[in-house]
Image: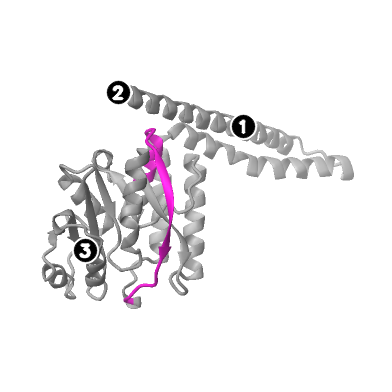
Amino acid sequence: MKYLVVIPTLNEAKAIGLVLDEVLSLGVSRDSIVVVDGGSTDGTREAVISRSVKLIDQEGRGKVGAIKTVAKLANGVDYVVFLDGDYTYPAKYIPVLVREACSNGYDLVIGARKVLEPGAQSFLYGLGNKLLTKVFNLLFGTRLSDVLSGMYVVRAEVLKELGFESKGFGIESEIVAHIVSQGYRVQEVPIEYRRRVDEGGKKLRIRHGLQILVDMVKMAWRYNPTFFIFTLGSLALIAGLPLGLYVAYHYFFTGIKYYIKGLVAIILTLAGFQSLLLAILSLYMKRMEIRILTELRKAKKS
């Protein structure tokens, strides 16, 4: 199996040299490493060139632009390995992830951050990551623990299928959404996570987390619109149930009868409950579709 190690960068002069030295120390050839730069001006490019590693300019802006650029160039390889250029992801896990993907036929193997170096992740950042992962699991029926990890191995041919509709840091969730929605196989492998070498160069902000959330909702609409629509419809329960309890309380304890409010409460509750059942049904139908797609791919390979 051939694989390509891709490192997206933007002003990571203090870290990129350490990352490349660590990757090269594993025996990965320079021909199998590509640094995709988003327009660095701090010496990042010079650090890459000095190590005789291939450097290319990304198309577009943000991390999604870097990965989209790589998708067009990932020819002649089976897998693409991604890791950030800030030295937070130990390169020693590259062979571990690749081995897991190759030996078990996974289309995506995520390096799930389980062992964190003190100070590597703030409370707010960690909480946001967990909340976004839970939202993703709810929308796509998965049980992943770190959907936004910046270190993962993905099958090259699958990477080329992406529509690249997300913005910036939401590209990881788009990759996973495509994988799980099209019947491909995904696995997580626990990895370590280090503190940034350049603390002042951290690029992820609260607004990026909100954008990732929006991108997840868009992906849910794209890959399973029926579930998304009925889930929205089930929100009628939030209004119907409290209103129904209010009407019932006054009917039994005060003798006041709210006929119009009672009728509205019944309609909202029934519509919300019905939508909830249909949302659950559509989720199971989607899972059936995924199983069928998986079996068809197995039959095609055999």
Dot 2 or dot 3, earlier in sequence: 3
Left or right: residue 247 compared with residue 208: right
Return the residue nearer the eye: 105 or 277. 105
The one nearer the camera, 8 or 59, is: 8
> Marks 1 and 2: which is nearer the front?
2
Q: Which residue is mark 1?
A: 271
* Residue at point 40%, 36% (across, down): 181
SS assignment at label 1: helix
- Between 265 and 275, the one lying in front of the other is 275
Which mark's residue is nearer the viewer, 1 or 3? Answer: 3
Which residue is at 47% across, 64% downward? 115
Q: Secondary structure at mark 3?
A: helix
Image quadrant occupied by the N terminus: top left
Based on the picture, tell me whether residue 238 belongs to the magenta stretch.
no
For label 2, the SS is: helix
Give coordinates of residue 11: x percent, y percent: 23, 71
Label 3 is placed on what type of residue? Leu
Q: What residue is shown at x 29% (from left), y 26% (from top)?
A: 301
Mark number, residue 300: 2
What's the magenta region? 175-198
Kind of residue at disc 2:
Lys
- How far apart are the two marked residues, 1 and 3, measured between alpha carbons? 59 Å
Query: Residue 91, percent across and down?
Result: 31, 62
In three-dimensional space, the C-alpha distance between marks 2 and 3, rounded to whole angstroms, equals 37 Å
Q: Is residue 165 visible?
A: no
Q: Specify whether residue 228 is in view.
A: yes
Identify the disc placed on residue 24: 3
